[in-house]
Amino acid sequence: MSFSIIGKSIAESVTLKLNETAAILRAKGEPVIHLGGGEPKTKAPLDAIMAAAGLLNSGDIRYTPADGIPALKKAIIRFTLDTYGRLVAPENVIASGGAKQAIMVALQAILDPQDEVIFPAPYWVSYPEMVKLCGAVPVPVYPEDGTFYPRLQDIEQVCGPYTKAVIINSPNNPSGVVYSDQFISDIVEFCEEKGIYLIMDDIYHRLVFGGKKPANCFDYLKGSIDDSKLILVNGVSKQYAMTGFRIGWAVANKKLIEVMTNIQGHQTSGPSVVLQAAAVGAVNGIQSCVDSLCTTLENNTRVMMEQLNAFTGLGVTKPDGTFYCFVDFSNYNKNSTELALFLLDKVRVITVPGIEFGCDGYLRLSTCGSVKDITEGIERIKWAIDPNSPNELFIGERKLTRDWL
């Protein structure tokens, strides 16, 4: 059986596979703690549910324009003005089946085979595979100073004649760090000078802690968006805890949006009208749900940090936002895949191997769950790998005896 070169080059989505594994184990009655998830546990906003229910009750469920219904585009325009201080036109906006699709159609619209796309490491697991789906070449950048905070020099060193785009994700998945205003200013100016595309993946933009504010890329854009190669991506999945609704969007110059719309029209057509209606409800509705989610995540992150600091030999950078901690476990095992499988097998804790984000020896731990999940999950991990822990552990009614240290 033969497959395409691109098809053979694409790896399975590890995060989606982990969600599947967790569901299967739980269905079997296993006491699984999922510290690998990327979706908040809070409910979708009532405004979103009511908007979707109202449309469903009408029974008028039809095709939608390939770039999104007018009501959603209007809501995105308002959101962009309120959040970024920039007024854009409907022709600058495309609504997609999640922020992932918005990025994907943007890449398909701008990349030719062998073009290169730069992104700082650690990076979201899908960036390399999405670039490869376009026949292009992913180029991860590792900050020279060993931190999670890239500098312009790091980007400059790998930028070459085939560089077509840079992807920036701040707050960052998996590290949770917020890139500095100076770096965002530098990268916007750099991409403008080089004439390369800058994709700002701002999906976690409003989930920031301690009163911090992530940099606004539009503050550093010299001209209008129609004269730029800036592509701003966002969506409802994270900030409104609406992961299953699969609605995201991109804001960019009108010519690019037109090309992206043509691609999406043949790819999937427009997103579901019901889900778009829910997104309109969320974006136009009461925004206290975002503040409430942010407060919960900040508290969960504080608990996670307290638990991790009880370890010896871990490297932990305090997250500025998102719902992840990216933790260096290399003193215990430099092979992150091996360590993640070990923890799943021995103590039924699901984590995401750091190698999937470009950094082996690390594990991504999620703060999406309850405080109980976090404390018990870290307790199990500590018991499994820390020789200073007691030799026995109870998981529910099950007594475990450690015989591997």
Image: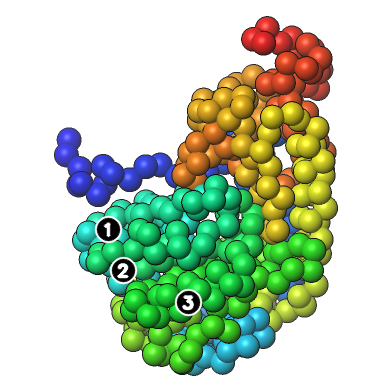
Q: CA distance from mark 1 to mark 3?
A: 22 Å
Whether residues under marks 2 and 3 lie with C-beta atoms below 8 angstroms apart, the answer is no
Q: Which mark is residue 136?
A: 1
Whether residues under marks 1 and 3 lie with C-beta atoms below 8 angstroms apart, the answer is no
Of residues 275 and 174, the one drawn nearer to the viewer in this rendering: 174
Residue 279 in view of the camera: no
Residue 83 percent coordinates (x, y):
65, 81
Residue 202 percent coordinates (x, y):
57, 68
Q: Quadrant of residue 241?
A: bottom right
Q: Which mark is residue 188?
A: 3
Whether residues under marks 1 and 2 lie with C-beta atoms below 8 angstroms apart, the answer is yes
Q: Which residue is mark 2?
A: 164
> Which amino acid type is shown beneath numbered disc 2?
Lys
> Which amino acid type is shown beneath numbered disc 1?
Ala
Classify 10 Å Cα crowding around label 3: few (below 14), some (14-19), many (20 and above): many
Residue 350 percent coordinates (x, y):
62, 34
Residue at 34% from the left image edge and 54% from the top image edge? 138
> Which numbered disc flags the more N-terminal residue, 2 or 3?
2
Image position of 178 (left or right of 397)? left
Image position of 55 (left or right of 200)? right
Of residues 44 and 118, the one drawn nearer to the viewer in this rendering: 118
